[in-house]
Image (tube, grey):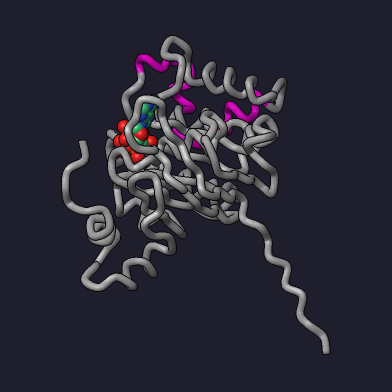
């Protein structure tokens, strides 16, 4: 009798039992966090203030070493081979990480060089990224003269200049108007359709519901729920949407 051979493609990123204890903190920021990001997925990482989202992104982008746990990207150990991993990932951080006295074009060019791009290829990528985020016309103005929405869009352009396989976005639409927000979300969807996988954090639940194929809700550094937003909502009695599910799981008390 023949058995059907099913080859299961491993996830793009596999995090297992990550623990981070900051020296001055009383409780661990990550307390056994495990998650999987599939290829081609927009994966939402949700949680209240202080849940551990930025810490998790710092670990998964090799900026912070966990005290224990494992982390594989494309089957390779990110903790022992961080340089290898850095070529395949991009980061759009929560704070604007651009040089304010340089123009958008100069910033993208600079970060592109850091990623090893040079010559024609670098110039072409600068133009593509500027056009993508709608900054072609303002490309030669210093970042310091930009509006909040323009800075967020330039921040995104810098994160994708080297065409990463997996892009980490830490609240990329915080504090901007509906127009810039809409453009960023459309850009992300387009990049995803072209093959870029993403990990996305936001406090806007409707954004996560619209954008993410799968989410995890975390609190106190570990996972409370994981799955497709619609499946998670449907499985929970009395929940009509992701916001209600989020509040049921994480509670209504304020986080300071
Ligand atoms: N450098 C640090 N030293 C000590 N404690 C820290 C440090 N950075 C973060 N923490 C603590 O670790 C926990 C997780 O913080 P983290 O910033 O990862 O949460 P978050 O989910 O990203 O929050 P937010 O939604 O507010 O950005 C919090 O209790 C925070 O106070």
- List the single residue furthest toward the top: 101
144 magenta-colored: yes
In this view, 199 is above or below 227: above
Left or right: 68 in relation to 101: right
The magenta stretch spans residue 235: no
Residue 169 at x, y = what percent? 45, 39
- Which quadrant: the N terminus? bottom right
> Which quadrant holds the C terminus?
top left
The residue drawn where x is 63% and y is 36% is 79
Q: Give the residues in magenta.
A: 122-145
Residue at image location 29% in from the left, 45% down from the top: 48
Q: Position of residue 202 (x, y in %)?
A: 35, 44
Q: Nearer the viewer, residue 244 or 221?
A: 221
Front position in the image: 44 or 137: 44
* 130 or 68: nearer the viewer: 68
Residue sticking out furthest to the right: 1
Quarter residue 166 falls in: top right
Residue at image point 46% right, 15% down: 99
Residue drawn 41% across and 46% down?
185
């Amino acid at each position: 009798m023949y058995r059907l051979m099913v080859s299961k493609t491993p996830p793009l990123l596999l995090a297992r039992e990550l623990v981070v204890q900051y020296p001055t903190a009383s409780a661990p920021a990550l307390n056994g966090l495990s998650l999987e990001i599939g290829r081609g997925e927009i994966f939402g990482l949700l949680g209240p203030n202080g849940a551990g989202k930025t810490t998790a992104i710092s670990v998964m982008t090799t900026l912070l070493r966990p005290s224990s746990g494992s982390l594989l990207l494309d089957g390779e150990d990110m903790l022992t081979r961080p340089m290898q991993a850095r070529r395949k990932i991009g980061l759009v951080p929560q704070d604007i990480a651009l040089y304010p006295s340089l123009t958008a074009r100069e910033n993208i060019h600079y970060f592109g060089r850091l990623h090893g791009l040079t010559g024609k290829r670098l110039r072409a990528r600068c133009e593509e990224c500027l056009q993508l985020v709608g900054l072609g016309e303002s490309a030669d103005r210093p970042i310091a003269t930009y509006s909040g929405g323009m800075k967020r869009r330039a921040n995104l352009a810098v994160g994708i200049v080297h065409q990463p396989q997996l892009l980490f976005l830490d609240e990329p639409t915080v504090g901007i108007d509906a127009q810039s927000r809409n453009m960023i979300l459309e850009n992300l969807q387009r990049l995803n359709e072209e093959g870029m996988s993403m990990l996305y954090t936001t406090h806007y639940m409707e954004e996560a519901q619209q954008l993410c194929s799968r989410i995890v809700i975390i609190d106190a550094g570990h996972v409370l729920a994981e799955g497709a937003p619609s499946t998670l909502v449907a499985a929970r009695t009395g929940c009509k949407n992701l916001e209600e599910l989020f509040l049921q799981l994480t509670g209504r008390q304020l986080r300071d």
